[in-house]
Amino acid sequence: MDANRIFDTSFNVIKSIIKDKISFNSAIKNQIKNIRKDELNLISNLSGLFLRNYFSIRYVTEASFNSNQLEVVIYSGLVFVNIYFKKGVDEKAAITYLANKLELFQIKYDEETKAKFKKFLENKKDSLKEYLDTKFKGKSFRKYLSALTNLPERIIKMIQNQYDRKIGFDTIHSIFRMPSQYAIGNILLADNLTDQMKSNFHIIEPNFYEYDQKTSIRKEEAIRTGLLLPIQKAEYNLVKSLPNLLGSNITFYFEEKSSIYYALINKYLNEGNKLSLACNKPSLNQDLYSKIKPLGINKLDIYESTHSELIAHLSEKQDLFILLPENSNFEQLRRVPEYGILFDTSKLDSIIENEFTKLSDSTQYIADDGLLVYVVPTLNIKETMIITNKFLNAHKEFTKVKEETFFPFEKDNSILYYAIFQKKVSK
């Protein structure tokens, strides 16, 4: 396997993500021309490992080569993860590649730098602590946590400031532990689900399954064909908390990738309910348009719409309105390796303002005694409990029925918050 080809292509992927702020998948697709499948798998693997270890790689590079220049960080980081995680490029070839690239930046890979780099390869955790304690004179706890967990310091600081010590510490160390995988049966296609398709699942509740394998649930035939629909346990919990409705108007508006609509269809597409699903980012929710909309289901309307455009679609007051606005989305940290690197915290104040504005504007759609649900996959209290309290103070016609926060250190390690409000009957 050609080390230069593998590392150069991986370098281009990572640099385009960080510099051009494009997604991992787009960056990979831009590099696939004339790349063999086995090479592509390794390039994808190395690039992903780099992004998932970015905050420690920066310190490894700085300590080993006295440089924090992006190109040097990428070259050294790729070689580091290849050797550290025992990936496909021969170690000797990888070191030769790195030495040649460092030379371009007037950095010599001599015995001294070789020894420093090797020290991190042999014991990254202790070497990082030693380097950070020396550099920052013992005031490096958050930097060390960032390097170990690959969380940006700003998010670590946020969690520590908003929660008590135990919850904060447990959250920081468990964010990247992937959640258990669940699915619900698709009532629209239920008769086609075979026992063989369910062989890697066990049933938790009627029509609710836990996936038994460690691989991605989306590789399963039942998932690919839409017979089983993936959903997080916390999302399922939310939908279970909602009342059974008959002959009602129900709308779910969402600006993030979501699986909640699967459970909503299963629960409410019956007994004369009219269900509307509105999404302003169809590219993030392709199943909605590729598997659900083509079925042309009666009393199920699917709109590509912004929140402000909903008024043109909803001619009647809603008995249930669920809002999932754009948010800081901590859930993305564990699923999208570049998210923590690229997320622009300068936009957070405007995001929070928009969340509150959209929640307030949604009140116009709620019928007397109807429910308004606010849901966000984040742990930032400014977007969860603070918005809920602000909303209740501003809208005395609503009462809070229930709110719940799901933490990543809990059994099913979801990241989700929801609050259910009910509109008082007008007198």
Image (spheres, rainbow, N blue to C red):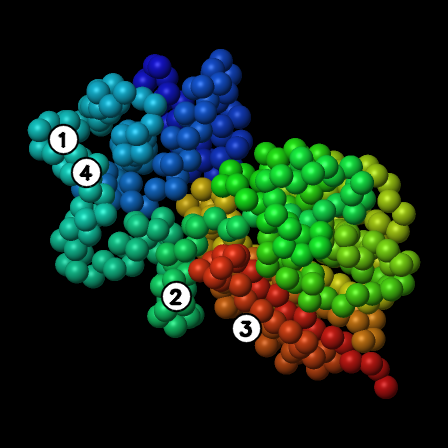
**Vertical order, 40 against 314 (above or below):** above
Which circle's residue, 3 or 2, is located before the other in the chain?
2
Secondary element under disc 2, as helix, strand or loop, is helix
**Picture disc at residue 114:** 1
**Vertical order, 347 against 25 (above or below):** below
Look at mark 3 in the image and give the residue it sits on.
386
Q: CA distance from mark 3 to mark 2?
A: 18 Å
Mark nearest the camera among 4 and 1 is 4
Look at mark 2 in the image and give the residue it sits on.
168
Secondary element under disc 3, as helix, strand or loop, is helix
Q: Amino acid at mark 4?
A: Glu
Q: CA distance from mark 4 to mark 1?
A: 12 Å
Q: CA distance from mark 1 to mark 2?
A: 37 Å
Q: Amino acid at mark 1?
A: Lys
Secondary element under disc 1, as helix, strand or loop, is helix
Q: Is residue 372 left or right of residue 390?
A: right
